């Protein structure tokens, strides 16, 4: 005995894939995963499904959303054969995320709904469903779904942020501020935090706290001046505070901002511009 330790052999090639991804060599990572799947095709179906998941993740990292969805669906079909409801729900949620990012909110909602049918109480799938419902133009349905998430997990930051934004957009400012402050006290990703803060600025303006609203809005516009949703809320804040000169410019910036507004948000922005035009003509 020499006392030396030996690493377990990399039987499924996962270490090779991880190394290739870490080095940014996505082409090699894809090839290694494909080789794994060939080796496993006549063997363990679960390992084959997991290799498909890795293939999907690498494709997503490379920006290949259609390829990523294809591999997620390949994994999904195997998890269904295996009657693995949890893994099938996860795969459905991952496909839903891709559709959401592509702006196909109705498909994202349907996929997350299928995931919830397999795993009732899955807060991630429910949260994805709520956001998709909201972006598709159904804020009341989305708020109800967020309520369900929060019954399962009262500290789900994304659900609090989503419900708070809906409440701010609908003018229920006190309730919105409570949700948003709770969400911001927890951990949110950068974009989710930006959206929560722009909604918080809107709620503060609606409550007559103009100085605080301007301070919050200035901070998030400095962080990301081209964010369409922030600009849309800046236009609404200008309207609430009677800053007529700022309304049109902010709404126009929202319509040209990135990432693009949802179709429901764009329609709301256009209605504001039409109202401004009507007011100008009647003056």
Image (spheres, rainbow, N blue to C red):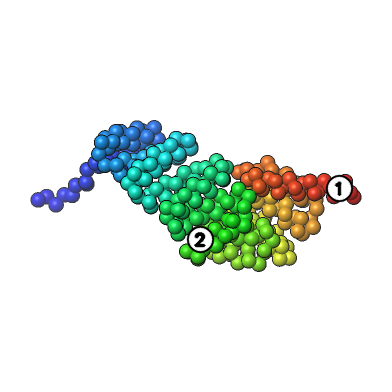
Decide which of 144, 135 is in the foreground and name it.
144
Q: Residue at x 31, y 36 (%)?
A: 37
Q: Quadrant of the rendered structure where residue 80 is? A: top left
Q: Position of residue 41 (x, y in %)?
A: 28, 36
Please state the horizontal and vertical placement of residue 279, each as a whole percent of the image.
Answer: 85, 50
- Label 2 neighbour load within 10 Å: few <14, some 14-19, many 20+: many
Q: Secondary structure at mark 2?
A: helix
Q: At x 75% / y 58%, what residue is drawn?
A: 240
**Mark with earlier residue (2, 1):** 2
Residue 12 in view (yes/no): yes
Along the line of sight, the residue nearer the viewer: 39 or 2: 39
**Residue pictured at 58% horizontal, 56% vertical:** 142
Structural distance between the alpha carbons of marks 2 and 1: 44 Å
Residue bearing mark 2: 149
Query: Would residue 216 appear left or right of 27 to someone viewing this image?
Result: right
Q: Nearer the viewer, residue 281 or 133?
A: 133
The residue carrying mark 1 is 280
Which of 182 and 169 lies nearest the eye of the viewer? 169
x, y (%) of residue 196? Answer: 60, 57
Element under disc 1: helix
Vertical comparison of 253 with 67: above or below: below
Q: Does the residue at mark 2 contact the one at mark 1 (Cβ under 8 Å)? A: no
């Amino acid at each position: 005995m020499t006392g030396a330790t030996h690493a377990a052999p990399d039987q499924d090639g996962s270490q090779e894939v991880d190394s290739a991804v870490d080095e940014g060599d996505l082409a090699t990572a894809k090839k290694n995963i494909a080789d794994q799947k060939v080796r496993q095709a006549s063997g363990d179906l679960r390992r084959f499904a997991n290799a498909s998941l890795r293939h999907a993740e690498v494709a997503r990292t490379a920006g290949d959303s259609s390829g990523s969805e294809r591999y997620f669906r390949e994994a999904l079909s195997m998890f269904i054969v295996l009657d693995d409801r949890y893994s099938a729900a996860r795969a459905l949620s991952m496909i839903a995320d891709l559709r959401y990012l592509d702006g196909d909110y109705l498909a994202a909602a349907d996929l997350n709904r299928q995931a919830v049918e397999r795993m009732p109480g899955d807060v991630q799938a429910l949260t994805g469903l709520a956001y998709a419902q909201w972006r598709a133009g159904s804020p009341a349905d989305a708020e109800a779904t967020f309520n369900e998430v929060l019954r399962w997990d009262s500290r789900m930051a994304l659900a609090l942020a989503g419900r708070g934004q809906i409440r701010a957009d609908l003018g229920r400012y006190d309730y919105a501020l409570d949700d948003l402050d709770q969400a911001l006290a927890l951990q949110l990703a950068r974009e989710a935090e930006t959206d929560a803060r722009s909604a918080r600025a809107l709620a503060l303006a609606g409550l007559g706290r103009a100085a605080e609203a301007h301070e919050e809005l200035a901070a998030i516009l400095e962080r990301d001046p081209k964010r369409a949703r922030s600009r849309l809320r800046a236009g609404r804040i200008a309207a609430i505070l009677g800053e007529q000169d700022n309304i049109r410019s902010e709404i126009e910036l929202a319509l040209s901002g990135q990432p693009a507004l949802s179709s429901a948000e764009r329609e709301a922005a256009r209605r504001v511009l039409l109202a401004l035009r009507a007011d100008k003509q009647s003056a």
